[in-house]
Amino acid sequence: MIPKVSIIMPVGYGDRYFQLALNCFLNQTYEGETEIIIVDNSDKAIESLLPEDERIKYYHCERMPVGALRNYGTARATGEICITGDEDDWSAPNRVESQVSRLLKSGKAVTGWHN
């Protein structure tokens, strides 16, 4: 069985790089089901920038530290695996596929992603 993956993306600085980061996750090669949980605490909400896509779940909330935003998004995730991505990150098209594969092969509860 291929696990569902929830991608948690805190947003707090508006739209400067957000669209690039969102497109990186929308264009992943992972064959399983994904959802993108966007937790926006920016002064200028970015909801109007979102494409119509059933995978995107959007939440606007009060200002809080990035760790709290990740926890907020994780609490709303429905995937068996959660991956975090920041609004100013570029991710390779196979990032989710690679990260899930390493997680499942290792048997560990957590893996990291670097470069």
Image (cartoon, rainbow, N blue to C red):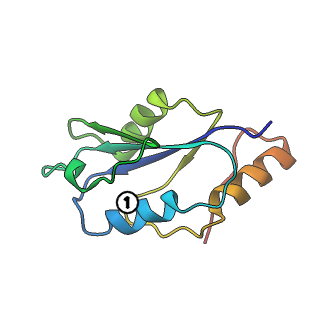
- Residue at (20, 36) in percent of width and height: 62
Q: Is residue 55 left or right of residue 111?
A: left
Q: Which residue is disc 1 drawn over?
A: 87
- Residue at (49, 65) in percent of width and height: 24
Task: Using the rendered view, name the quadrant where residue 23 is placed.
Answer: bottom left
Q: Position of residue 33 (x, y in %)?
A: 62, 42
Callout 1 secondary element: loop
Q: Position of residue 104 (x, y in %)?
A: 81, 44
Q: Position of residue 58 (x, y in %)?
A: 33, 40
- Residue at (43, 41) in percent of width and height: 54
User: Label 1 amino acid?
Assistant: Glu
Q: Which quarter of the image is occupied by the N terminus?
A: top right
How many discs appear?
Answer: 1
- Using a 10 Å C-alpha cutoff, classify the residue at mark 1 as few (fewer than 14 neighbours), some (14 to 19) or many (20 or more): many
Q: Which quarter of the image is occupied by the C terminus?
A: bottom right
Judge whether 112 appears above or below 74 on screen. Answer: below
